[in-house]
């Protein structure tokens, strides 16, 4: 379709549109295991205005539009299931404002986590945001668009809970502001005290519009940060331990991991408990509180703190933690994927045993990575499996293991996080019918032509 | 390596750590910065090469362009978090080699003519003048001289780089160093040829040089270009070379330290641009800075991206001549001179003839002519010399 | 399986019961000590087994070369005691399980054991090691296993050590230089105590350094430093090597300050105490560490010289925070030779 291509070129400029086989091939997939599907065009807009014009064109032509940030969801959420226009947002990566006193920042819709990390570090060293462990090319909007969780999730919840305002190109092409910024120069609230409409976009994986700006909360960054790793061989104790730790209201992040290799880690569940403080005294006080809270387990010899020697500690302190992505290559295969339901912490022991079972059933390298969200309110439990990209049989086995893991989690009252298309269907099957009906109405109202990331959350 | 890469290349996870500098402040892969499609990033290339190997993507001009816009700057090798990080650029080169054989005649036109020129006339710059023309007044190498000064193709033919070569020769002369150049008899070092995938031609060029140096009894070579330095120091030994190789800044640093070159007060704010083949390839970051620091009054300012994180000028892998990344505000040389200017420098110091050419032309494109001067360390030192 | 050769007869004639009387963690009079020792020997329960913090000191205190500490560990295990929590104990046992992840250089007559401590690779460069650096081995297959004394798991040692001796011997060298007191101690003290023959010459790296420094003496620049020396617990197994510290220091022009916590009165780095016990162990560890560092400050030193890598890892950041620069013995020697310091986890380069 030469006319669409030239219309797109007209909008974003030469050099920023491609319908070549190579770009279509690359943008048909993500690092995960989902079935690829090629876009017809890949465009790189530089402004909200360009995004608007692309969306309007798509409406006229009734062709799909799929926004993409880092493309790192692993569950294929930015794979254009019906082709159309793939919008790579990453030329829109300016940091527009940091309000230091009100502790919020506003950035463009394609700004990478990496850039935000570096910018705050350089210009606002007393502030931080909730950094996920996704590789730094992940975008903050992408993370909010899938209800991601970062380093501050235990304290302040999902990334989407921290949003303070949005600018969105609606599926019909209008540019719309959400939250305080809709009537005030300040981006401090995503809704309250107004009716909160941010829920129409956050977590909607690009099916309800393209976010071109996002405001988000910043939090105090203490001068010191440390980690203590508590280790136990009894998974059944973990919900209790988490309850005690969250009761303290003193720890930053709590991550739990469990993996059979290297041998040193075999059979043990490791809880990384992060602490922050402005002085040694503050930090030491918190450490002591943590040790005291867990002393009964130590005295019973059921658990203890492991020695993180200086050669391994930096691995734990990195943000994002590179070792998570390195899991892809532990068996020299270049791939990994996880099913990461959001589920109650009390399900940890069952889920951990299930991961082990799936690992041995499908003969896979596995790892559990769980992140606490809120004061024990729930967690992201990651059933992670590594695979070799050159071994299609192994890739199939991982798909099966992930399907089973999700099925298991839903049976246990969990919700699928960043669900694949199939998992979305399963979720909709389980949903209260009136909820589903409302969902369908909203989708129809927002996106009458069904052009936004179609194939996802399709209410039939 | 060429056989090996096909069994490894699927290991790239496409996580994209390789796109950044070490602080994540900027994208640091020059071709990604220029084109902004993921296909032009490291992982884009690796995935496309893998797809080509598996028959999922066909070879065409566009794939050629994607492959050859990698300037082999090694930022990705520095930043990739996986155990194979060190091999990344070699994989890309190996794939070019492979394609050169399997997809004969389909390489991008500019790459083809680059190689052809070297093959036919011994340099890629289409220069027909005698190679030694620049060296008027510079001693030719004669048996027994301590050093051979090797200036390379740019040093022999490119206007700016010739001045650079000349300054270095002058400095060596003034310091009483026993040296000489090969003039008309000098041949291309072959580094770029190798990175473009023409291994056979590289070996031919390298063997010629090794044999010539041996016949002349050369024991120590001073290379002007970090690219030649790298090839001669790290790749020639496998082909039988056993001479010592220095980059010219290493010798200058010694001469300054030993008091053989003395400088006077020179007020200038200077930013130093680390060349990839000196820095990331060979870990030499301090020596050139020491030369600059040795000039009294000269203030060395650092750009945000320096040393391991330096943003490449975009001239590597033949692009100083082919310039496949030209034509945009986002062309790496233009991005880099803006960065230098914003860091407050009035002089952008370089230590590589490629960088010199690339950045000089970018200053013009950016309209910074009267605000920023690109100058090589030899020229800066020469101007500051007490004579 | 090999067994501990403990000579009860020596204890019967022993008047001072130095082993337990001098123990800094027990505070016993001679009679109680004798009674408790008797129980331990007879396999009855003694509170000593509970209160021992595995500091190794009694091995040194026994004037008759008996092995009170090894016996204590045997008994602790027989009683099924866990010193550290189960998860931690298993973690350490699994950590050094030989699974074929070792590395061997070009072995010559003389070889260098890097034990299973990768941080050593960083240190063994330069002139000091130029003759032996290439002839190295590293990996769990060659791991001395002494550390399980801290975990009441003598059985792991009994099971693995003979095999380790075999593995090393099979590499075919005549002499091995050990870079860690634990390793040296394991082949010089533990192996004989368990009747395991060691078919190669066992050399402590202090001795190696000392000889090498003498050869290089022309190139040495006196450091003129006052330093604190952190004597490790494993030095208690081999007190005969301690004099090398003074010998080396005198070659380097370094003064080992007199301070409370050195020599026989050395204070343990407390890394293991911290691991093995609950909050009170942690308090004890913090307390020991601050007393130790305070003592260094009192003595007015700028450097603390480490011998054991684990002491280094446990204390380096803490001493540095108080303005005392940590330096490993090897780095100290390299400093006097004017060599570039290493930059890795045990490198002095981090603190220059
Ligand atoms: C190694 C690894 C570790 C990870 N760790 C974490 C972690 O700790 N926490 C966590 O939360 N996640 C994690 N992830 C998952 C994921 O990478 C992150 O959530 C990431 O932030 C997603 O951002 P992205 O830019 O890659 O989004 P993409 O994958 O590009 O997009 C995600 C969804 O958002 C939509 N979208 C993208 N941009 C826009 C826009 N401008 N407007 C509207 N919709 C848009 C897309 O269409 C897609 O549906 C991890 C992934 C990997 C590979
Ligand atoms: S080259 Fe390395 S860092 Fe880059 S995407 Fe591949 S695995 Fe990740
Ligand atoms: S070598 Fe440089 S240009 Fe090539 S892929 Fe790596 S970072 Fe990009
Ligand atoms: S072990 Fe030694 S000191 Fe202790 S009682 Fe026996 S002989 Fe005496
Ligand atoms: S090892 Fe230490 S604590 Fe234990 S009994 Fe011997 S001296 Fe006392």
Image (tube, grey):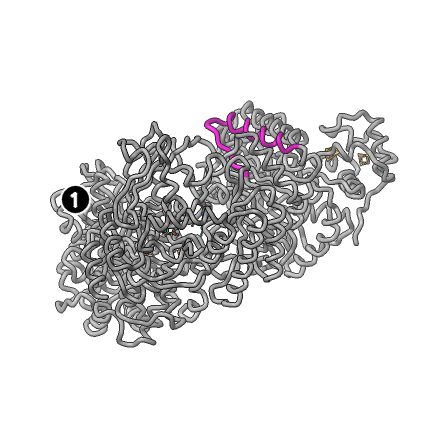
Q: Against A330, is B264 above or below? A: above
The image position of residue B363, as x and y in percent, is 16, 49
Q: Residue at x 50, y 47 (%)?
A: A432
Q: Residue at x 55, y 26 (%)?
A: A285
**Is residue A155 visible from the viewing direction of this image?**
yes
Ligand 3 positioned in quadrant: bottom left
Magenta segment's dominant SS is helix
The image position of residue B3, as x and y in percent, is 42, 71
Q: Is residue A325 left or right of residue C298?
A: left
Question: Is residue A290 in the magenta section?
Answer: yes
Q: Against A309, is A59 above or below? A: below
Q: Is residue A130 left or right of residue A408?
A: left
Residue nearest the viewer, comparing A319 with B3:
A319
Label 1 chain ID: B
The image position of residue C53, as x and y in percent, is 71, 34
**Is residue B215 visible from the viewing direction of this image?**
no
Residue matched to label 1: B372
Q: Against C319, is A79 above or below? A: below
The image position of residue B92, as x and y in percent, is 35, 64
Instruction: Indicate yes or no: mark 1 CB to ligand 3 under 8 Å.
Output: no
Q: Secondary structure at mark 1?
A: loop
Farthest residue toward the top?
Answer: C298
On-image quarter of the C terminus of chain A: bottom left
Instruction: Please tell me in which quadrant of the rendered image residue B321 appears.
Output: bottom left
Q: Residues within 10 Å of mark 1 (few under 14, many from 20)?
A: many
Residue nearest the viewer, comparing C15 with A312:
A312
On-image quarter of the N terminus of chain A: bottom left
Residue nearest the viewer, comparing C54 with A81:
A81
Count of numbered tags? 1
Q: Which residues lie in the magenta part?
A: A273-295
Q: Is residue A339 left or right of residue A197?
A: right
């Amino acid at each position: 379709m030469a006319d669409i291509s030239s219309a797109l070129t007209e909008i974003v400029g030469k050099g920023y549109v491609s319908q070549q086989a190579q770009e279509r091939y690359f943008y048909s997939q993500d690092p995960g295991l989902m079935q690829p599907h090629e876009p017809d065009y890949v465009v790189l807009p530089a402004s909200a205005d360009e995004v608007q014009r692309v969306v309007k064109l798509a409406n006229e032509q009734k062709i799909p539009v799929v926004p993409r940030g880092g493309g790192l969801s692993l569950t294929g959420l930015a794979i254009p299931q019906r082709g159309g226009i793939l919008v790579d947002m990453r030329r829109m990566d300016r940091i527009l404002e940091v309000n230091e006193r009100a502790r919020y920042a506003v950035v463009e819709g394609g700004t990478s986590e990496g850039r935000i990390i570096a910018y705050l570090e350089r210009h606002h060293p007393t502030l931080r945001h909730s950094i996920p462990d996704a590789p730094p090319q992940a975008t903050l909007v992408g993370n909010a668009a899938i209800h991601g969780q970062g380093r501050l999730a235990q304290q302040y919840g999902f990334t989407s809970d921290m949003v303070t305002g949005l600018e969105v190109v609606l599926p019909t092409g209008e540019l719309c502001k959400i939250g305080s910024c809709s009537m005030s120069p300040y981006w401090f609230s995503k809704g309250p005290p107004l009716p909160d409409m941010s829920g129409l976009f956050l977590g909607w994986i690009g099916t309800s519009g393209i976010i071109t700006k996002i405001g988000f909360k910043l939090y105090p960054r203490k001068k010191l940060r440390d980690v203590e790793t508590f280790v136990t061989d009894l998974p059944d104790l973990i919900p209790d331990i988490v309850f005690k730790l969250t009761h303290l209201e003193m720890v930053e992040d709590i991550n739990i991991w469990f993996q059979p290799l290297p041998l040193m880690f075999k059979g043990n569940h490791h809880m990384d408990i992060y602490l922050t403080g402005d002085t040694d005294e503050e930090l030491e006080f918190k450490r002591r509180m943590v040790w005291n809270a867990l002393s009964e387990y130590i005295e019973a010899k059921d658990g203890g703190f492991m020695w993180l020697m200086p050669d391994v500690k930096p691995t734990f302190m990195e943000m994002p933690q590179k070792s998570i992505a390195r899991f892809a290559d532990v068996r020299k295969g270049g791939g990994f994927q996880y099913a990461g339901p959001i589920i109650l912490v009390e399900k940890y022991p069952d889920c951990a045993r299930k991961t082990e079972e799936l690992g041995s059933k499908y003969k896979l390298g596995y790892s559990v990575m769980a992140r606490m969200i809120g004061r024990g309110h729930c967690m992201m439990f990651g059933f992670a499996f590594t695979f070799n990209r050159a071994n299609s049989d192994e890739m199939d086995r991982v798909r099966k293991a992930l399907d089973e893991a999700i099925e298991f989690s839903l049976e246990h009252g969990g919700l699928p996080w960043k669900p694949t298309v199939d998992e979305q269907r399963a979720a909709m099957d389980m949903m209260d019918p009136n909820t589903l009906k409302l969902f369908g109405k909203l989708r129809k109202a927002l996106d009458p032509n069904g052009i936004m990331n179609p194939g996802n959350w399709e209410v039939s | 390596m060429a056989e090996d890469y096909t069994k490894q290349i699927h290991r790239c996870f496409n996580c994209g750590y390789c796109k950044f500098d070490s602080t994540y402040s900027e994208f640091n892969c020059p071709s990604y910065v220029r084109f902004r499609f993921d296909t032009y990033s490291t992982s884009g290339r690796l995935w496309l090469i893998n797809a080509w190997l598996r028959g999922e993507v066909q070879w065409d001009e566009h794939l050629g362009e994607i492959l050859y816009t990698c300037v082999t700057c090694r930022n990705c090798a520095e930043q990739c978090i996986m155990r194979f990080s060190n091999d990344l650029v070699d994989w890309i080169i190996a794939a070019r080699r492979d394609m050169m054989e399997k997809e004969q005649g389909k390489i991008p036109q500019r790459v083809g003519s680059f190689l052809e020129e070297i093959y036919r006339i011994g340099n890629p710059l289409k220069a027909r003048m005698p190679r030694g023309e620049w060296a008027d007044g510079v001693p030719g190498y004669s048996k027994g001289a301590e050093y051979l000064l090797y200036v390379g193709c740019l040093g022999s033919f490119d206007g700016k780089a010739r001045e650079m070569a000349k300054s270095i020769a002058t400095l060596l002369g003034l310091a009483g160093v026993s040296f000489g150049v090969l003039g008309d008899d000098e041949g291309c070092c072959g580094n770029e040829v190798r990175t473009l995938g023409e291994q056979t031609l590289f070996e031919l060029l390298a063997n010629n040089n090794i044999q010539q140096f041996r016949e002349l009894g050369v024991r120590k070579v001073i290379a002007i270009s970090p690219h030649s330095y790298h090839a001669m120091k790290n790749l020639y030994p496998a082909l039988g070379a056993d001479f010592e190789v220095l980059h010219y800044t290493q010798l200058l640093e010694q001469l300054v330290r030993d008091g053989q070159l003395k400088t006077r007060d020179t007020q200038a704010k200077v930013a130093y641009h680390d060349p990839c083949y000196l820095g990331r390839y060979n870990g030499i970051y301090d020596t050139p800075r020491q030369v600059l620091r040795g000039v009294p009054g000269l203030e060395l300012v650092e750009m945000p991206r320096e040393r391991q994180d330096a943003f490449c000028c975009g001239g590597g892998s033949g692009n100083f001549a082919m310039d496949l990344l030209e034509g945009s505000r986002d062309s790496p040389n233009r991005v880099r001179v803006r960065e230098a200017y914003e860091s407050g420098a009035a002089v952008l110091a370089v230590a590589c003839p490629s960088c010199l050419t690339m950045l000089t032309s970018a200053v013009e494109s950016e309209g910074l002519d009267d605000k920023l001067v690109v100058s090589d360390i030899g020229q800066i030192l020469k101007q500051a010399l007490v004579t | 399986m090999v067994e501990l050769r403990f000579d009860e007869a020596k204890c019967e004639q022993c008047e001072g019961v130095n082993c337990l009387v001098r123990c800094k963690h027990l505070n016993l009079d001679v009679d109680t000590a004798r009674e408790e020792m008797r129980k331990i020997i007879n396999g009855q329960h003694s509170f000593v087994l509970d209160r021992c913090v595995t500091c190794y000191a009694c091995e040194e205190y026994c004037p008759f070369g008996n092995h009170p500490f090894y016996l204590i560990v045997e008994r602790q295990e027989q009683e099924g005691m866990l010193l550290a929590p189960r998860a931690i104990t298993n973690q350490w046992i699994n950590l050094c399980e030989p699974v074929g992840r070792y590395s061997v250089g070009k072995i010559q007559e003389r070889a260098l054991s890097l034990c299973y401590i990768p941080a050593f690779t960083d240190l063994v460069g330069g002139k000091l090691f130029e003759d032996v650096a290439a002839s190295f081995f590293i990996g769990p297959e060659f791991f001395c296993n002494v550390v399980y004394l801290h975990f009441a798991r003598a059985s792991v040692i009994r099971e693995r050590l003979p095999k380790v001796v075999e593995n090393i011997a099979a590499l075919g060298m005549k002499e091995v230089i050990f870079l860690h007191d634990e390793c040296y101690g394991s082949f010089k003290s533990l192996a004989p105590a368990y009747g395991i023959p060691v078919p190669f010459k066992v050399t402590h790296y202090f001795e190696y350094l000392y000889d090498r420094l003498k050869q290089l003496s022309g190139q040495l620049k006196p450091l003129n430093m006052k330093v604190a020396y952190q004597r490790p617990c494993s030095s208690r197994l081999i007190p005969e090597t301690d004099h090398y510290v003074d010998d080396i220091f005198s070659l380097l022009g370094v003064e080992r300050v007199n301070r409370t916590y050195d020599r026989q009165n050395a204070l343990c780095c407390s890394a293991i105490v911290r691991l093995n016990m609950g909050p009170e162990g942690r308090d004890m560890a913090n307390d020991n560490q601050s007393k130790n560092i305070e003592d260094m400050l009192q003595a007015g030193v700028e450097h603390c010289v480490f011998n054991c890598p684990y002491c280094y890892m446990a204390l380096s950041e803490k001493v540095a925070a108080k303005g005392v620069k940590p330096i490993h013995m090897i780095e100290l020697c390299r400093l006097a030779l004017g060599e570039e310091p290493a930059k890795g986890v045990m490198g002095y380069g981090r603190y220059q």
